Amino acid sequence: MKFYSWDRDFGYVLYCNPEKKGSTLLECRLNKSDWDGASTPDKGEWILFKEANGNRGKKAKKAHSFNFDWQGLLIAMEYRAENAYIKGRDQQGDTHNINVLCHTISAIQKQNSNWEDIVVSSFAEYLSPYTGETLKEIIKEFLLDNQLCKVLIGILPKFKSYQNENVTFTNGINELCSSVEEIIFSKKDIDILSALPSDFDFNPYEEQVLRF
């Protein structure tokens, strides 16, 4: 929420559309009648809504609070590659630059002691419908973002220990692990290398480390 007026019962939302590649920062109006919640939203609160046409331009409808949990994380995973950030300058001239997926993971981490399990199982579920080149392309889109790379590298042991009887879940995680391990050295970025957990096994990558 950019802001919400308690007196006038409306506010404005800042957002990007993940269905549009390279979407720019947008604003739309939120009326009280389109808000589904016990209390009105606060400034800075994250919400979910449907974009619609209103009398004064774009408006939000069926709006409600965004929950920082596994379901919210699945939604945030749609924001990747060109759409990883909500960024730009709003109509008031304020600049915004928010990494949607990393912000969601950070919020989950603050609220849950088992946040790593939530992240891993959410990635497993999100990737499970995909196979072959489609799966590799989606993972590639995730790993374009160095900030997300560092998060995934930091919990790589948790990814590698993931188990599930559903082979579609484990296949996705195995492919993700392989891609993350490969990118550790291919990017040649010291910040990414420093994100490695202390128990990371360098032995299989001795040659890459020497070249680094």
Image: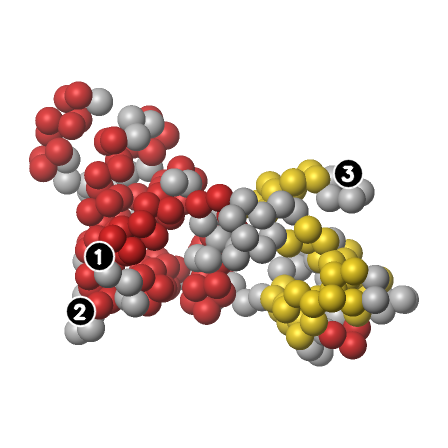
The alpha-carbon separation of the residues under discs 2 and 1 comes to: 14 Å
The alpha-carbon separation of the residues under discs 3 and 1 comes to: 44 Å
- Residue at image mark 3: 93
Q: Is residue 80 left or right of residue 85?
A: left
Between residue 99 and residue 50, name the one nearer to us.
Answer: 50
Q: Quadrant of residue 40?
A: bottom right
- Residue at image mark 1: 132
Q: Residues within 10 Å of mark 2 (few under 14, many from 20)?
A: few
Looking at the image, which residue is at 63% across and 69% down? 50
Q: Amino acid at mark 1?
A: Gly
Query: Going from the N terminus, do you reach mark 2 or mark 3 first?
Result: 3
Q: Amino acid at mark 3?
A: Gly
Between residue 166 and residue 151, name the one nearer to us.
Answer: 166
**Residue 167 circle label:** 2
Q: Quadrant of the N terminus?
A: bottom right
Query: Going from the N terminus, do you reach mark 3 or mark 1 first?
Result: 3
Q: Amino acid at mark 2?
A: Val
14, above or below 114, in the image: above
| Percent position of residue 3, x then y | 77, 56
> Which is in the foreground here, disc 2 or disc 1?
1
> Can I make out residue 110 in this image?
no
Looking at the image, which residue is at 46% across and 69% down? 71
Looking at the image, which residue is at 22% across and 68% down? 168
Looking at the image, which residue is at 33% across and 37% down? 195
| Percent position of residue 147, x then y | 43, 40
Q: Quadrant of the C terminus?
A: top left
Q: Please, which residue is most extreme toward the right here?
A: 7
The alpha-carbon separation of the residues under discs 2 and 3 comes to: 49 Å
